[in-house]
Amino acid sequence: MKIVELSSEGEWREAFPLMQQLRPHLDEAQYLSLLAAMKPSGYRLFALREAEGGIVALAGLTLTTSLYDLDHLFLYDLVTDEARQGAGFGKQMLGYVEDFARENGCTGVTLSSGFQRTRAHRFYEQGMGYSKTGYSFRKRF
């Protein structure tokens, strides 16, 4: 297993089927367009690859600063292949994300997760030591 950054369109295309498990509302064209638009703002996509090269987990993140979290890593996307969940890949990927945050001088990792993702919440809280600190609100136009 190896964690690598995916930075080319070809790598992003390879990762799309797995990202679509987390973001089923996106088609490949939207996904590629959004990645290209987010990259200049610091969005980075990392993959956990098996020795044979297949991707089993992804993490999309930015290093950012805010008044409430100071210098922190915001984790936008974390997904493990549904067929491979429970094998420790999510824990390995999130551990990498946390190490990456520390190496870059961050005070911590922040993420947002939908109410319906109860298994993910158990993983974050019980498996990885995260705390629920508030609600995330959205208004669509």
Image (cartoon, rainbow, N blue to C red):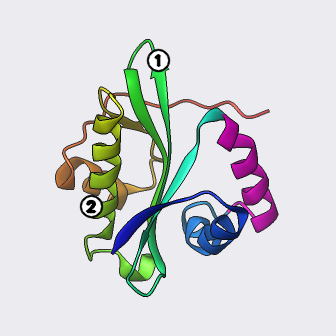
For residue 91, which numbered disc appears in the image? 2
In percent of width and height, residue 35 lies at: 69, 51
Callout 1 secondary element: strand
**Label 1 belongs to which residue?**
66
- As for residue 33 lying within the magenta part, the answer is yes
Pointer 1 local density, CA inside 10 Å: few below 14, some 14–19, many at least 20: few
Callout 2 secondary element: helix
Callout 1, which amino acid? Ser
- Rendering quarter of residue 69: top left
Please state the extent of the stretch shown in magenta in the rendering.
25-40
* Lower sequence index among marks 2 and 1: 1
Q: Is residue 59 left or right of residue 119?
A: right
| Residue at screen point 67% across, 61% down | 8
Q: Characterize the magenta stretch by its predominant secondary structure.
A: helix
Q: Is residue 105 left or right of residue 136?
A: left
| Residue at screen point 28% across, 50% down | 124
Callout 2, which amino acid? Lys
On-image quarter of the C terminus: top right
For residue 76, which numbered disc appears in the image? none
On-image quarter of the N terminus: bottom left
In percent of width and height, residue 122 lies at: 26, 55
| Residue at screen point 29% across, 26% down | 107
Q: Front-most of 39 and 85?
A: 39
Outermost residue toward the bottom in this view: 52
**Is 70 above or below relative to 90?**
above
Outermost residue toward the top in this view: 67
In percent of width and height, residue 95 lies at: 27, 53
Pointer 2 local density, CA inside 10 Å: few below 14, some 14–19, many at least 20: some
- As for residue 8 lying within the magenta part, the answer is no
In percent of width and height, residue 9 lies at: 72, 63
Q: Front-most of 126 and 19?
A: 19
What is the number of callouts on the image?
A: 2
